[in-house]
Amino acid sequence: MLKPDQDIRGVHVSERQVIRRGQDLAIILLNTVTLVAASSTLLLPGTPDSAAGTILLAALGCWAVFRLFTRSRALGFQLVDFGYVLVVAAAIPWFESNPGNLYTNSVPQVIAGTAVIAFTMAQPPKVSFPAAALITLAYASGCAQRI
C-alpha cells in the first residue's frame, strides 16, 4: 500500500519535484553549453578538422536552439540529448586530428563533461550512474581512436 506522500510509481513526491527542477536546469545547461561550443568552433577558421565534424556541429547547434526554445522534459527529447552526447564523445576524430589536442579543452570534452553533470541533476541515481558510465566509455572510445 502506498503512503500518502508517494505517487503511483512509488517515488517520493519530494524526489519527483527535485528531479523535475533538475531536468529543467539540465536542459538549459547542456544545450547552452552545446550551442556555445558548436557555434564558437564553427566560427574559428579551420575547425573542425573534417566536413563530418562541421555537419555534426551545425546539427547540434540547431538542436540546441530548438531544445532551449521548447525545454520539453519528454523522454524522447531527453533520449536524443543523451544520444547526441554519446555520438559527440565517440566522434573525437571528427573534431581533432592531432592527438596532442586531447590534453586541451575540446568540443567533445566540454559537451561530455557537462552532460555528466546535467544527467546527474536530471535523473535518479539508478539512471544517472549508468548514463555517466556510458558517456565515459564513449569518450574513452573516441580518445582511443586518436592515440
Image (cartoon, rainbow, N blue to C red):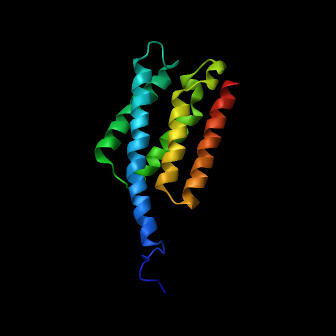
Residue at 63 percent of width and 25 percent of height: 102
Q: Residue furthest left?
A: 69
Quadrant assignment, res 59: top left
Is residue 100 shown above or below 1? above
Residue at 37 percent of width and 52 percent of height: 24
* Residue 140 left/right relative to 65: right
Residue at 43 percent of width and 48 percent of height: 26
Quadrant assignment, res 99: top right
Tag count in the figure? 0
Quadrant assignment, res 55: top left
Residue at 40 percent of width and 40 percent of height: 31
Is residue 143 shown above or below 14? above
* Residue 49 left/right relative to 19: right
Is residue 11 shown above or below 38? below
Rendered location of residue 9, percent (x, y): 46, 73
Q: Residue furthest bottom?
A: 1
- Tell me the quarter of the image containing the C terminus: top right
Q: Residue furthest top?
A: 45
Rendered location of residue 111, percent (x, y): 50, 36
Rendered location of residue 116, percent (x, y): 54, 45
